[in-house]
Amino acid sequence: MVVIRLTRVGKKKQPTYRLVVQEKHQDPWGKAMDIVGNYNPRTTPKTVVLKAERIKEWISKGAQPSPAVHNLLLTHKVIEGEKVAVTTTGKSGAKAAEAKAA
């Protein structure tokens, strides 16, 4: 299955992200089939550059955007629909999940 997801690039504590098209089970930092945009959350306002035509082409071929990418594409009106809940896998996300369960 092919997915469109974010991969982190940039120096330590200075993240920027690329929107890449890859196989789902491939390493996120491995070789990408296509780079379809980038996202810099550190600028004001946040910088987003998307190749809308390429993204629509990949989605038409069956690529599934990750929840974070899905919401980003909705915000920039590349696709239409409802926002999706994004789950975090970091330490703070695990603590939040434990707090909900308790």
Image (cartoon, rainbow, N blue to C red):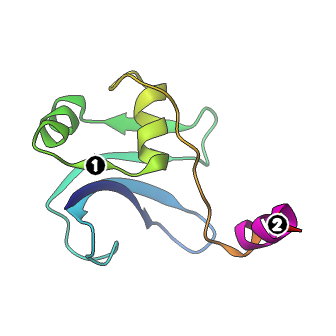
Residue drawn at x 61%, y 48% as measured from the top left: 42
First reached walking from the N terminus: tag 2 or tag 1: 1
Q: What residue type is labelled 1?
A: Gln
Q: Do the residues labelled 2 and 1 touch (CB within 8 Å)?
A: no
Task: Tell whether position 80 is magenta.
Answer: no
The Cα atoms of the two marked residues, 2 and 1, are separated by 29 Å
Q: How crowded is mark 2: few (under 14 residues within 10 Å), some or many (20 or more)?
A: few
**Which of the two discs, 2 and 1, sits closer to the camera?**
2
Query: Residue 46, percent across and down?
Result: 57, 37
Q: In this view, does 10 lie to the left or right of 61?
A: right
Query: Residue 73, percent across and down?
Result: 40, 33
Query: Residue 77, percent across and down?
Result: 39, 21
Q: Is residue 45 left or right of residue 73?
A: right
Q: Is mark 1 on a helix, strand or loop?
A: strand
Q: What residue type is labelled 2?
A: Ala
The part of the chain drawn in magenta is: 93-100
Residue topped by disc 2: 101
Residue drawn at x 22%, y 38% as measured from the top left: 55
State which quadrant residue 48 falls in. top left
Residue topped by disc 1: 64
Residue drawn at x 46%, y 37% as measured from the top left: 72
6 to 28, vertically: above or below: above
Secondary structure mostly seen in the magenta stretch: helix
Q: Residues within 10 Å of mark 1 (few under 14, many from 20)?
A: some
Disc ID at residue 36: none
Between 23 and 76, the one lying in front of the other is: 23
Q: Is mark 2 on a helix, strand or loop?
A: helix
In the displayed orientation, state which residue is furthest to the front: 101
Quadrant occupied by the N terminus: bottom left
Q: Is residue 60 left or right of residue 68?
A: left
